[in-house]
Image: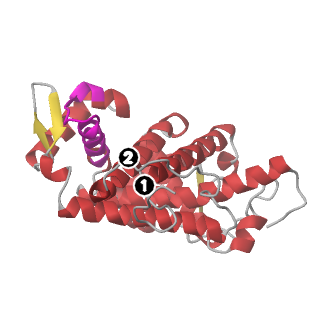
Amino acid sequence: MTTETGDGDQRRRISRLVFRCVSRFLVEEAARLIAVHDRDFVRAMIFLAVRQATRAGQAARSVSVRAIAQSLMLPYETTRRKILELEDRGYVVRVSAQGVAAAPHVLDGPDVRDACRATAQAVVVTIAELKALGVDLVANVPAPTHVSVDASRLDLEVGQLVEDFILRVLEAGVEPHGSMLDALVYTAMMIANADPIVRDPEIAWRYSSADTPPPDTVRRPVTIAELSQRLSIPRETMRRRVTRMLELDRCESVRGGYLSSMTYMQSEALLSAGVKINQRFGQLVQSLRQVGFDVDGGAAKPPA
């Protein structure tokens, strides 16, 4: 698609289109992980961090409770309590007084591989959605010179890369939003509001410029019940988070639900966070291709 704007404006337009699609991918993948952990967001993120640390390197490793707390910017006592819950449910095992590791069955196995395959397909769908909008993230990604992962373990590698993307993006959201959960809730509201825009290429491009933010008449209000369902988070937890967002003028109550604040969305902190999300997703696409994953089709692809 061509426009009469300059290259800089065109890049910013593309960046907004990418951000909308990637954010929806983030919300849907985070919700899937939260649902597995009894709708407990904090426990889900701590489990991801433990699993990522355990997978690191060539051999299984352990990680300390304090290191997880510092990495996720969570209180130590909260982290310790959630890890005890994960131990009780068999998701992590105690290695030492302070060290824990992911249990073997959550590192591999049929259920884990099925979940990783679903995640891989979600990546492919997101890339295809962007292509439908005229944005090809794959065009400039170099083909791998060799495949670094055995085809039999490709699903697990894809899952690990996506989980790292989710953790890093939500950690980066702490500064502008106050916590990882607040960052995710705000993103979910913003994406729900933008659903009518993202699904129509013409409208998406029309409202992709900083000078053409989508009017409220185009955006769709979202209810607390819908946000709760989208993120697999208890309704009361969602109500408290949305109430806090209202108090901070980050959203507004309108007929039919809530709309994210356009003023807050256009703030420097949020625009900068959006750029980081796009960069992280670009790095994810590059990493997936380098391990042999066909980002266009979702299977192992040998080097040319």
Mark linked to residue 120: none
Mark linked to residue 292: 1
What amino acid is at disc 1?
A: Gly
Coloring applied to the structure: secondary structure
Instruction: Give the residue at mark 2.
Output: 148
Q: Distance between the residues labelled 1 and 2?
A: 7 Å
Is any atom of residue 259 visible in this view? no
Q: Position of residue 153 (x, y in %)?
A: 28, 55
Q: Where is residue 72 in the image (x, y as percent from the top left)?
A: 36, 34
Instruction: Tell me if residue 118 comes above or below residue 181 in the rendering.
Output: below
Q: Is residue 152 magenta?
A: no
Q: Is the magenta stretch mostly helix, strand or loop?
A: helix
Q: Are the residues tagged 1 and 2 within 8 Å (C-beta)? A: yes
Q: Where is residue 230 in the image (x, y as percent from the top left)?
A: 41, 65
| Residue with the most extreme front position | 304
The quarter of the picture where the N terminus appears is bottom right
Number of marks: 2
